[in-house]
Image (cartoon, rainbow, N blue to C red):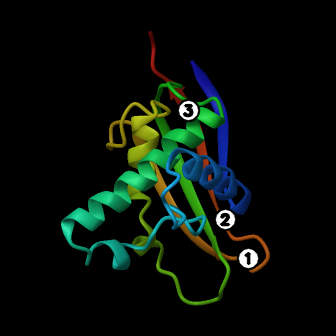
Amino acid sequence: MTNKRIQIIIDKHTLEKYNKLYFKLHPRAVKEPIEVPFHPSINTWMIMKRPAMNRLKGIWKDFIVWLMKDLGLTGYGIDQCDMKFTMYFPTKARHDPDNNSPKFLMDGLTESGLIVDDDGKHIKSLTLVCEYDKEYPRTEIEIINIILKEN
């Protein structure tokens, strides 16, 4: 079975909705688990000590699993596809696409069942794009050339 395209947008509204739920589930928490609508740079998380990195990875994975459930995409079962991640940053500061590898996002997409796995057998191509949008920072995930897992 083939589907043409899925687009997922992570923006301020998405984060506000998730953070509201997060604080309801964790009433003693004081810090928003996810503060910006794009994946942390590899320059940020690779220098963290392992427990901090694992915590950050878990926060993002939980967020993406929630988002897929919220969008009705849990267990969708994409067996093969091409993916494009476009991060729209609020400043014109230089951003290297390879430093914005969506590792934690991909783990959440796999955990949620949207994609079968994030290896080369299932993700045929991965495109990373960095753009500027002061008014509407966000991450857009575009999934195309979708082949669903056969039951």
Residue found at x 48% / y 73%: 97
Figure quadrant of the N terminus: top right
Residue sitting nearer the eye, 126 or 74: 74
Q: Which sits in the foreground, 11 or 149?
A: 11
How far across and how far down the image is residue 102, in percent?
44, 59
Q: Mark 1 points at which residue?
A: 133
| Location of mark 3 (residue) | 146
> Could you tell whether 51 is left or right of 27 in the image?
left
Mark 3 or mark 2: name the one nearer the start of the chain: 2
Vertical placement of 101 versus 60: above or below?
A: below
Q: Specify few, some or many for label 1: CA neighbours under 10 Å numbering under 14, 14-19, or 20 or more.
A: few
Q: In this view, does 86 lie to the left or right of 39?
A: right
User: Can the viewer see residue 124 in this picture?
Assistant: no
Q: What residue type is labelled 2?
A: Arg
* Residue depicted at 60% across the width and 55% down the height: 19
- The amino acid beneath tag 3 is Ile
The total of numbered circles placed on residues is 3
Residue position marked by numbered label 2 in the rendering: 138
Q: Residue furthest top?
A: 151
Q: Where is residue 28 in the image (x, y as percent from the top left)?
A: 48, 57
Disc 3, disc 2: CB below 8 Å?
Answer: no
Q: Quadrant of the C terminus?
A: top left
Q: Residues within 10 Å of mark 2 (few under 14, many from 20)?
A: many
State the image coordinates of residue 145 (x, y, percent, origin top left).
Answer: 57, 36
Assign a secondary structure to mark 3: strand
State which tag comes first along the sequence, 3 or 1: 1
> Gap between marks 2 and 1, in whole Å?
8 Å
Mark 2, secondary structure of its residue: strand
Outermost front residue: 28
Looking at the image, which residue sits at the far right? 135
Check contact, mark 3 vs mark 1: CB within 8 A.
no
For the residues labelled 3 and 1, the Cα–Cα distance comes to 28 Å
